[in-house]
Image: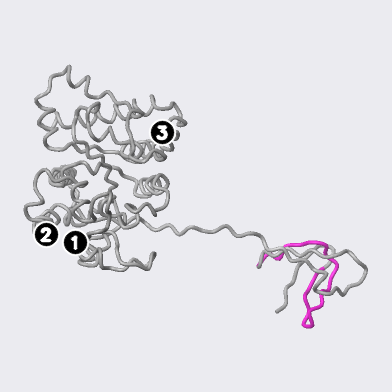
């Protein structure tokens, strides 16, 4: 094929026999973005081995796929019943998501030694790894495609919550906000991450992954277990604090959803307790992985205003949810 390089002092062409014709010293071809360099000699014919073609480095373009979530309808109307049928007496009011992880994937010291194939998630093939084992979300989508869709809510929470109370909080939040259960999709790490990679420690950087997901979805719902922020499980976990931090610095919408037990405690509380309850210290939170903790705290410390600004912003948001809860009653 023939490549033409235009130049104000002449032109260059690669001929049919491989010879180079022209007088240009160096010029870009606007279509192929290839730069031509060759010796400035009198001859109008140059051998190809005298010609240097420089192809610019192309940056790898990362494909951005909208995060997929699980429908609120499936979560609050079906998941609890599925667990009850699968685990019977092992599943009850006190069962936390950490407990459920052990039931599904085994204890931490013997992870995946005894896997329960809930919804077929353990037998479905993960195309990325070429092995069996996908996220619960993927298995839910295989079961019924309508139960999975583009995530509209990023749920910030902790695995130490009771499964039943957590699902109840989601139901109440969406009902209060008049969000349709069937078309509201929640991104919840327990369901949406492939735990066969996350729990084995082979997943990519969690700080980057979670931060990107928060920003892509654009709306964070913090499910908080107690209105007393200083003693809430929610504010003791660094990952949940990190998710709030990312939402704040990115201008992402943030809502709080109190669990029902906490709502009743709030209604019974005195004003002095309410004042004390909103005190937050994000730097006192901890992560299981020491490296994650160091990385997240460094990010918070380096933000404008540092931890104090984040504490103040979180406290302000907490005052809002407390006021809304009191106004409803």
Mark 2 highlights which residue?
86
Residue 315 locus on image (x, y percent):
29, 27
**Residue 30 sits inside the magenta stretch:** yes
Residue 250's tag is none
Q: Within the magenta stretch, is there residue 185? A: no
Q: Residue at x 80, y 74 (%)?
A: 48
Q: Report if the CB atoms under discs 2 and 3 are less than 8 Å apart.
A: no
The residue at the point 25 percent across, 24 percent down is 278
Instruction: Name above or below for residue 102 compared with residue 318.
Output: below
Q: Secondary structure at mark 2?
A: helix
Give the quarter of the figure containing the N terminus.
Answer: bottom right
Q: Secondary structure at mark 3?
A: helix
Residue lying at 17% horizontally and 57% vertically, measured from the top left: 74
Q: Which residue is mark 3?
A: 297
The residue at the far front in this view is 109
Q: Judge the density around disc 2: few (<14), some (14-19), many (≥20) Cα neighbours within 10 Å.
A: some
Rendering coords of residue 104 (x, y %): 21, 56
Q: Earlier in the sequence, mark 2 or mark 3?
A: 2
Q: Is residue 7 above or below residue 241?
A: below
Identify residue for label 1.
Answer: 118
Residue 306 higher or lower than 170, as above or below: above
Quarter assignment of residue 317: top left
Nearest the camera: 239 or 246? 239
Asked whether 240 or 196 is in front, the reply is 196
In this picture, which residue range is highlighted in magenta?
Answer: 11-31
Question: Where's the C terminus, which quadrant?
Answer: top left
Question: What is the distance, in whole Å, between disc 2 and disc 3 at their CAs?
Answer: 40 Å
């Amino acid at each position: 094929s023939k490549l033409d390089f235009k130049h104000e002092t002449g032109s260059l062409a690669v001929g049919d026999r491989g010879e180079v014709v022209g007088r240009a010293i160096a010029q870009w071809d606007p279509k192929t973005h290839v730069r031509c360099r060759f010796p400035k000699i009198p001859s109008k014919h140059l051998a190809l081995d005298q010609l240097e073609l420089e192809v610019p480095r192309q940056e790898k373009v990362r494909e951005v796929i909208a995060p997929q979530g699980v429908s609120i309808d499936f979560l609050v109307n079906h998941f609890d019943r599925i667990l009850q049928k699968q685990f019977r007496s092992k599943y009850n009011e006190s069962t936390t998501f950490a407990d459920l992880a052990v039931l599904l994937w085994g204890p931490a010291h013997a992870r995946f030694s005894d896997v329960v194939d809930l919804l077929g998630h353990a037998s479905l093939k993960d195309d990325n790894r070429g092995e069996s084992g996908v996220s619960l979300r993927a298995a839910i989508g295989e079961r019924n495609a309508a139960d999975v869709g583009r995530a509209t809510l990023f749920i910030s929470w902790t695995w130490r919550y009771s499964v039943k109370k957590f699902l109840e909080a989601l139901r109440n939040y969406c009902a209060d906000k008049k969000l349709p259960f069937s078309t509201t999709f929640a991104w919840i790490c327990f369901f949406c991450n492939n735990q066969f990679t996350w729990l084995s420690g082979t997943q990519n950087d969690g700080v980057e992954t979670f931060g990107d997901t928060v920003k892509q979805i654009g709306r964070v719902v913090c499910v908080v277990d107690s209105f007393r922020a200083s003693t809430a499980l929610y504010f003791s976990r660094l990952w949940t604090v990190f998710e709030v931090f990312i939402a704040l610095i990115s201008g992402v919408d943030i809502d709080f959803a109190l669990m029902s037990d906490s709502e009743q405690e709030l209604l019974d509380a005195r004003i002095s307790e309410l004042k004390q309850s909103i005190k937050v210290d994000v730097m006192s939170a901890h992560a299981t992985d020491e490296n994650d903790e160091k990385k997240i705290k460094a990010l918070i410390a380096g933000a404008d205003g540092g931890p104090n600004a984040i504490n103040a912003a979180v406290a302000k948001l907490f005052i809002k949810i407390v006021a809304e809860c009191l106004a409803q009653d």
